[in-house]
Image (cartoon, rainbow, N blue to C red):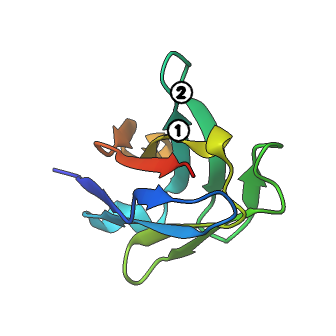
């Protein structure tokens, strides 16, 4: 059974930084597309950033230049370095593992809360 466990959320002032981590179980994690999504109160869940096994990345326009997604395939972990945080970044952040190409499955973590406030 694949599990995704996020960590690193918390409260920070505007302009601050946080680093989220997501640990994935299962050997297929090193092949899957890994992504970070977020859901703010009253809004739909949206893509923040994604990274494929080879390292190519994709970012939402709202976080380009501020957030960096990376992964360590040997550890089966994915990270989201968030810099210059803004109040609009406040949301629950979810880790996603898209392994549909290999096992037909799509996995989600339970989420970690990020609050940006002065």
Pick out the residue farthest to the bottom: 74
| Residue 38 numbered tag | 1
Mark 2 in CB contact with mark 1 (< 8 angstroms): yes
62 vs 54: above or below: above
Instruction: Label 2, secondary structure: give it.
Output: loop
Give the residue drawn at x 37%, y 81%. Answer: 75
16 vs 46: above or below: below
Most foreground residue, 92 or 102: 92
Residue 101 appears in the rendering = yes
Mark 2 or mark 1: whose residue is earlier in sequence = 1
Horizontal relation, residue 78 to residue 63: left or right: left
State which quadrant residue 28 falls in: bottom left
The mark tally for this picture is 2
Residue denoted by label 2 = 45
Give the residue drawn at x 70%, y 63%. Answer: 15
The x, y position of residue 109, in whole percent, is: 32, 46
Crowd band around label 1 with a 10 angstrom C-alpha radius: few (<14), some (14–19), many (20+): many
Residue 96 appears in the rendering = no
Horizontal relation, residue 42 to residue 113: left or right: right
Give the residue drawn at x 66%, y 71%. Answer: 54
Q: How far is disc 2 from disc 1 in space, using C-alphas?
A: 5 Å
Most foreground residue, 102 or 97: 97
């Amino acid at each position: 059974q694949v599990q995704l466990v996020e960590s690193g959320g918390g409260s920070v002032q505007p302009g601050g930084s946080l680093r989220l981590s997501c640990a994935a179980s299962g050997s297929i994690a090193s092949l899957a597309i890994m992504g970070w999504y977020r859901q703010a109160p009253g809004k739909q869940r949206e893509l923040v950033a994604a990274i494929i096994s080879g390292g190519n990345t994709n970012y939402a326009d709202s976080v380009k230049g501020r957030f960096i997604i990376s992964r360590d395939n040997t550890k089966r972990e994915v990270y989201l370095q968030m810099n210059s945080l803004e109040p609009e970044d406040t949301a629950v952040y979810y880790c996603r593992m898209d392994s549909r190409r290999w096992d037909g499955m799509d996995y989600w973590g339970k989420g970690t809360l990020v609050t940006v406030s002065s």
